[in-house]
Image: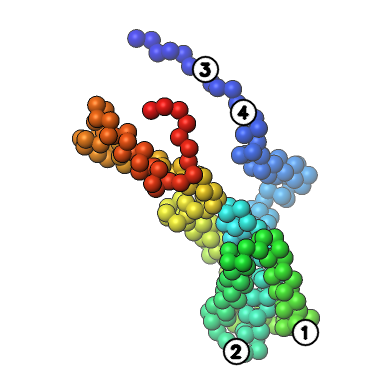
């Protein structure tokens, strides 16, 4: 028996560029820069570019989770500045160990994020307005805390603290490794943990209901093949499934006939 010849479907270029447009732009940019300078594609330059962009990459992971839920956070840069100047002051002027200072930085960032979450979720303030206010507050707090003066001399605090920024295990700068670990954690959160489903569907209630309806239908018609529920000659099968969908999934209208 000769298999029917299949022809590729017409490419939807709009969807294609929506999915891969940024990647194609990055590839074209790299090609143009490599043609403009022979040093661009060298390993030392690429590692330097990754080192400089690793901080923004770490911040972008948290920003991605906010954007997936139809939100925005304008305060990330100012909160980063506030937390780092407090941590630097704890290191230099208070003699605090590096691990504790890093913990304080994380607590400051978590506190700012909690305030943003309360303003958006409980007080129903638009994320743009709430985080704009936090951005202004954090920026002013950072300048007030330091009296507008930079905190210097951190390079004299010992090798343990400097390892986070200057160490190069296996020739790879430590900031790149930290960013890679953050990306890996984000991937696991979104693809391997049920909690990440809330981010993948973007907080869309309709999509969440459709997923729940699909799970109910599969459970009723696949997990219990030998049950009377799936007996095609038993009208109660359809009635039971429809009742489950009606009771557990609100807001979905079934179109068509079964």
Asked which quadrant contains residue 55, the reply is bottom right
Q: Quadrant of the rendered structure where residue 178 is?
A: bottom right
User: Mark 1 or mark 3, which is nearer the start of the sequence?
Assistant: 3
For mark 1, does the 10 Å Cα neighbourhood hold few (<14), some (14 to 19), or many (20 or more) residues?
few
Q: Is residue 201 visible?
A: no
Q: How packed is label 4: few (under 14 Cα within 10 Å), some, or many (20 or more)?
A: few
Left or right of 180 on screen, residue 139: right
* Nearest to viewer (mark 2 / mark 1): 1
Q: CA distance from mark 4 to mark 3?
A: 15 Å
Mark-to-mark CA distance, 2 and 1:
20 Å
How many numbered badges does the structure rendering display? 4
Secondary element under disc 2, as helix, strand or loop, is loop
Distance between the alpha carbons at the discs numbered 2 and 3: 70 Å
**Is 202 displayed left or right of 210 in the figure?**
right
> Could you tell me residue 120's position as x and y percent?
62, 64
Q: Are marks 2 and 3 in contact (CB under 8 Å)?
A: no
What number is the disc on residue 7?
3
Q: Quadrant of the N terminus?
A: top left
Cα distance in 3D space between marks 2 and 4? 60 Å
Label of residue 147 in the image? 1
Rendered position, 25 above or below 6:
below
Image color mode = rainbow
Q: Residue at x 38, y 28 (%)?
A: 258
Residue at coordinates 38% horizontally, 46% vertically from top-left? 247
Please state if 165 lies on the left or on the right of 254 as rendered.
right
State the residue in front, 175 or 141.
141
Viewer-nearest of labels 4 and 3? 4
């Amino acid at each position: 028996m000769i298999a029917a010849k299949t022809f590729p479907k017409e490419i939807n270029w709009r969807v294609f560029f929506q999915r891969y447009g940024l990647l194609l732009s990055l590839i074209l940019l790299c090609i143009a820069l490599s043609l403009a300078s022979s040093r661009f594609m060298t390993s030392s330059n690429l590692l330097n570019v990754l080192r400089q962009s690793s901080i923004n990459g770490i911040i972008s992971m948290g920003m991605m989770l906010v954007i997936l839920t139809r939100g925005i956070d304008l305060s990330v840069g100012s909160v980063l500045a506030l937390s780092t100047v407090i941590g630097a002051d704890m290191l230099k002027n208070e003699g605090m160990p590096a691990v504790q200072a890093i913990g304080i930085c994380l607590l400051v960032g978590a506190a700012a994020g909690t305030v943003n979450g309360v303003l958006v979720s409980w007080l129903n303030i638009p994320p743009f307005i709430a985080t704009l206010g936090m951005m202004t507050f954090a920026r002013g707090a950072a300048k007030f805390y330091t009296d507008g003066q930079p905190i210097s001399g951190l390079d004299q605090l010992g090798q343990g603290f400097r390892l986070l920024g200057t160490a190069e295990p296996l020739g790879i700068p430590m900031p790149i490794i930290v960013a890679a670990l953050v990306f890996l954690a984000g991937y696991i959160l979104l693809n391997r943990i049920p909690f990440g489903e809330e981010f993948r569907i973007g907080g869309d209630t309709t999509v969440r209901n459709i997923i729940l309806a699909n799970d109910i239908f599969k459970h009723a018609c696949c997990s219990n093949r030998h049950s009377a529920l799936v007996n095609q000659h038993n009208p109660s099968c359809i009635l039971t499934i429809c009742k489950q969908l009606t009771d557990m999934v609100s807001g979905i209208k079934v179109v068509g006939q079964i």
